[in-house]
Image: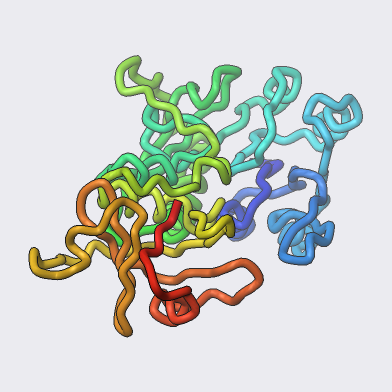
Amino acid sequence: MRLVFAGTPQTAVPALDALLASRHEVAAVVSRPDAPAGRGRRVEASPVAQRAAAAGLEVLTPARARDPEFLDRLREIGPDCCPVVAYGALLPQAALDIPPYGWVNLHFSILPAWRGAAPVQHAILHGDDVTGASTFLIVRELDAGPVYGVLTEPVRPDDTSGTLLGRLSRAGAELLVATLDGIEDGTVRAVPQPAEGVSFAPKISPADAQMDWKLPGHVVDRQIRACTPDPGAWTELDGARIKLGPVFLDPVSLDDPAHDLAPGELRASRQAVFVGTGSRPVRLGDVQAPGKRRMTAPDWARGLRSGGPVRFG
């Protein structure tokens, strides 16, 4: 089939690479416009746009997918199907109607669970044991179209959204190619999603990534892993924002002074730093203070003031 691929972040690059290596023809790529990126906030093309340009493909970056110039160019290219992975913008019906086989989205959940922008983060945040990826036909309702194919992936106890999404993006790329093969061959059909089991995964903002130490320890652990690497978990200490890496649920004996820490209260030794939660304490992993490099929690704690309790909050 003749394809126009739509995607924007690094997560979508494995799918583009898989399509370029498939029997299908990638005629062009659609991506979000150039935007500030990195620590220097320099304006750059998206990872997908950069990969497409390196492959010699035409790259379309409309400000809005309803722009007449974009729709006209898409009609000129004449794709049979438009596969999508994390494009990041709504597609109007005028665009959906152009390819005969529609727009086929690779979504990183087992639909109808976790429809929306952050399915992997919400799977970790809510303690799911298993998640996966689905390919489905895009319709106007959010992530509600009929499903072509599904794969499953266990959520590991130490998974962050970054590690889990990395595995899903690679496995999902193979699922997307297999789905397009099946559409072309007539061997797969889209099955309507069940009405039961629908849940939503809205984007997680930096405000959502602020730690609430009154929550139970296992929930704190999930929240930090769900927000790693983006948008990044954080807390406050003396008015400064402290960035946090994943924590550890180490067993703490009843006679250990760290056992009875109040929520947000810190206890540091040369080997470990514990923080109190609404249930059990958690051991800090990496910590980054404003203007400083990321370091282990014991190294960071050596610079803390002494003489009294220290508490996040």
Residue 22 visible within the image: no
For the N terminus, the quadrant is top right
- Is 296 left, or right, of 117 in this rendering? left
Residue drawn at (57%, 58%) of the image: 241
- Is 24 left, or right, of 270 in this rendering? right
How has the structure been colored for display? rainbow
- Is 154 left, or right, of 173 in this rendering? left
Q: Position of residue 138 (x, y in %)?
A: 57, 26
- Reply above or below: 197 against 29: above
Dividing the picture into quadrants, the one containing residue 89 is top right
Residue 83 visible within the image: yes
Which residue is at the far bottom?
270
Which residue is at the far left?
254
Residue drawn at (53%, 27%) of the image: 137
Total numbered labels placed on residues in the image? 0
Q: Position of residue 74 (x, y in %)?
A: 81, 33
Which residue is at the far right?
69
- Reply above or below: 81 against 264: above
Residue drawn at (83%, 28%) of the image: 71
Residue drawn at (44%, 81%) of the image: 302
- Reply above or below: 111 against 57: above
**Nearest the eye: 137 or 289:** 289
Q: Position of residue 276 (x, y in %)?
A: 29, 56
**Nearest the eye: 221 or 120:** 221
**Nearest the eye: 281 or 27:** 281
Q: Position of residue 238 (x, y in %)?
A: 53, 59
